[in-house]
């Protein structure tokens, strides 16, 4: 969601006449789009602002802006702690940034504007897309859940849904520009439709994405187990361009902890969804989020989490040590655990998940995979002469091109290769490429062209592929 919002901020600034700086040291404007989910985000922001203070002193005309969830939370505190900041804006008014910067220049003082509710849906703003081949499309913002550890609802507000026609018009506009893969975004993506009274809206949206010409891969994140319905599983299995991948947060395998977290499902319900997904898509890769060390967690609670991990056999897991966030109910709970206890449990969970991930990846050795070639996805690629790409199930694969295709592959192209080796967090394919398909996305990457979409306005709550009229309207403004 933060990457999506950053693309919108870039689009708004470019529309106002700003041009991206080629080097950080030469920028007239630096914008921080912040997160507030974990404490280290606070520390990183204020550390970065401190490092920029000398640059601002050397170049008084330089401007610094801070936006996003941490700005929504800290508000005027940011200017108090870093008075050299020029503008502070929240999650509900991304489009205000150019005006705030102009005001700050004119008034020669910091401008702080934090709204309590959306003034404009982010997706109605122009976007400067970062990728030629993969795009983020928001279906909703905000969240109606009240998880006791999470500060997001307080910072992004109640769920607000986009109309299906708007979502599909944006997806269609991206596909017409050569984008092959789209990820549908929502804080609680499968609750989509709550605003216009259709609990099956998300499954219908997935099926409609299957009708968009040129769109090869559809992903979504993140669903909530409470709202997961069988029609979504059917839509995933029956829509060819919806990828066999599911990221579904678990958070804890202990029913007692799930109740304390105010997560409205229990371990049995979660594992039941996993079983249904695997029955419909046997080769689906299922990933998750897990919090270790939630207040009051006992050794028995933690063992229950390990038990669910063993049963679910996740392809991978994003594991987090509980981070106390002021303003959340969990921050005031009794039973805050010592750091050493949390660290020890965290290490045990990582060890178990790595074992399971390696076993699952090893089962794929010898199989053929289709990869969407990615840019900069492997830190060792320059040294090993490998490229990287994502399989349809989301797994990261580092592959070695060979023969006449070696110099012709570009990010955004599609290749087929055979898996030769497995590791817990990636696969290796060192036997060459059996097929290489050059794409429009690869052509655009090669010449430095990225989709630049204008905002998509309000539409009607209907489903189906975008009609010619709205699609053409949405595509205006797409280009390099």
Image (cartoon, rainbow, N blue to C red):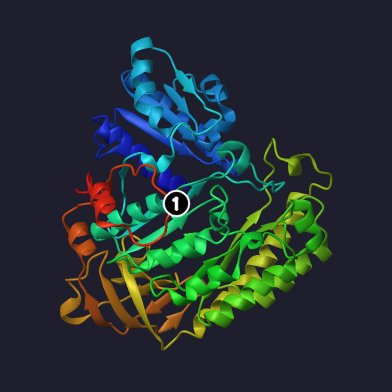
In this rendered view, identify the residue nearer to me: 339 or 174: 174
Q: How many marks?
A: 1
Q: Residue 326: x, y in percent?
A: 69, 36
Residue at numbered disc 1: 461
Residue at figure coordinates x 69%, y 43% from the top left = 324
Residue at figure coordinates x 57%, y 79% from the top left = 278
Q: Is residue 202 visible?
A: yes
The quarter of the picture where residue 304 lies is bottom right
In this rendered view, identify the residue nearer to me: 300 or 88: 88
Does residue 127 appear to the left or right of 114 in the view shown?
left
Q: Residue 253: x, y in percent?
A: 73, 65
Residue at figure coordinates x 26%, y 38% from the top left = 20
Q: Residue 121: x, y in percent?
A: 44, 39
In this rendered view, identify the residue nearer to me: 386 or 28: 28
Q: Give above or below for 3 relative to 265.
A: above
Instruction: Residue at the far bottom: name it.
Output: 366
Q: Is residue 451 visible?
A: no
How packed is label 1: few (under 14 Cα within 10 Å), some, or many (20 or more)?
some
The quarter of the picture where residue 354 lies is bottom right
Residue at figure coordinates x 73%, y 68% from the top left = 267
């Amino acid at each position: 969601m933060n990457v999506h919002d950053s693309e919108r901020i870039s689009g708004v600034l470019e529309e106002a006449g700003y041009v991206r700086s080629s080097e950080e040291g030469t920028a007239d404007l630096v914008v921080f789009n912040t997160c507030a989910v974990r404490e280290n985000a606070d520390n990183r922001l204020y550390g970065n602002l401190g490092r920029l203070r000398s640059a601002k002193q050397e170049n008084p005309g330089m401007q610094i802006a801070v936006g996003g969830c941490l700005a929504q939370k800290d508000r005027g505190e940011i200017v108090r702690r870093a008075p050299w900041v020029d503008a502070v804006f929240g999650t509900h008014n991304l489009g205000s940034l150019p005006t705030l910067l102009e005001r700050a220049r004119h008034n020669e003082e910091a401008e702080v504007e934090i709204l309590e509710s959306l003034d404009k849906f982010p997706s109605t703003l122009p976007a400067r897309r970062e990728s030629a081949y993969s795009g983020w499309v928001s279906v909703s913002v905000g969240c109606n859940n009240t998880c006791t550890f999470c500060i997001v609802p307080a910072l992004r507000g109640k769920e607000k849904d986009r109309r299906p026609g708007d979502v599909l018009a944006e997806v269609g506009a991206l596909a017409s520009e050569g984008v092959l893969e789209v990820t549908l975004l929502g804080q609680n993506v499968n609750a989509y439709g709550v605003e216009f009274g259709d609990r099956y809206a998300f499954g219908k949206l997935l099926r409609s994405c299957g009708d968009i010409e040129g769109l090869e891969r559809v992903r979504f994140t993140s669903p909530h187990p409470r709202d997961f319905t069988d029609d979504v599983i059917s839509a995933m299995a029956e829509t060819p361009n919806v990828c066999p991948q599911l990221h579904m947060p678990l958070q804890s395998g202990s029913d007692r902890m799930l109740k304390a977290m105010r997560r409205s499902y229990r371990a049995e319900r979660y594992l039941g969804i996993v079983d249904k997904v695997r029955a419909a898509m046997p080769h689906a890769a299922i990933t998750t989020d897990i919090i270790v060390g939630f207040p009051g967690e006992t050794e028995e609670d933690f063992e229950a989490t390990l038990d669910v991990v063993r049963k679910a056999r996740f392809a991978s897991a994003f594991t987090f040590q509980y981070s106390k966030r002021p303003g959340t109910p969990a921050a005031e709970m009794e039973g805050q655990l010592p750091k050493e206890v949390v660290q020890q449990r965290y290490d045990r969970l990582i060890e178990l998940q790595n074992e399971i991930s390696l076993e699952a990846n090893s089962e794929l050795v010898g199989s053929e995979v289709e990869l969407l070639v990615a840019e900069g996805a492997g830190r060792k690629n320059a040294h090993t002469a490998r490229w990287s790409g994502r399989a349809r199930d989301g797994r990261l694969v580092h592959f070695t091109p060979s023969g006449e295709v070696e110099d012709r592959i570009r990010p955004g192209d599609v290749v087929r290769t055979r898996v030769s080796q497995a590791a817990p967090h990636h696969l290796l394919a060192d036997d060459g490429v059996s097929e290489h398909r050059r794409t429009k996305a690869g052509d655009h990457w090669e010449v430095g062209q990225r989709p630049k979409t204008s905002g998509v306005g309000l539409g009607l709550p209907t489903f189906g592929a975008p009609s010619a009229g709205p699609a053409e309207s949405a595509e205006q403004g797409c280009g390099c």
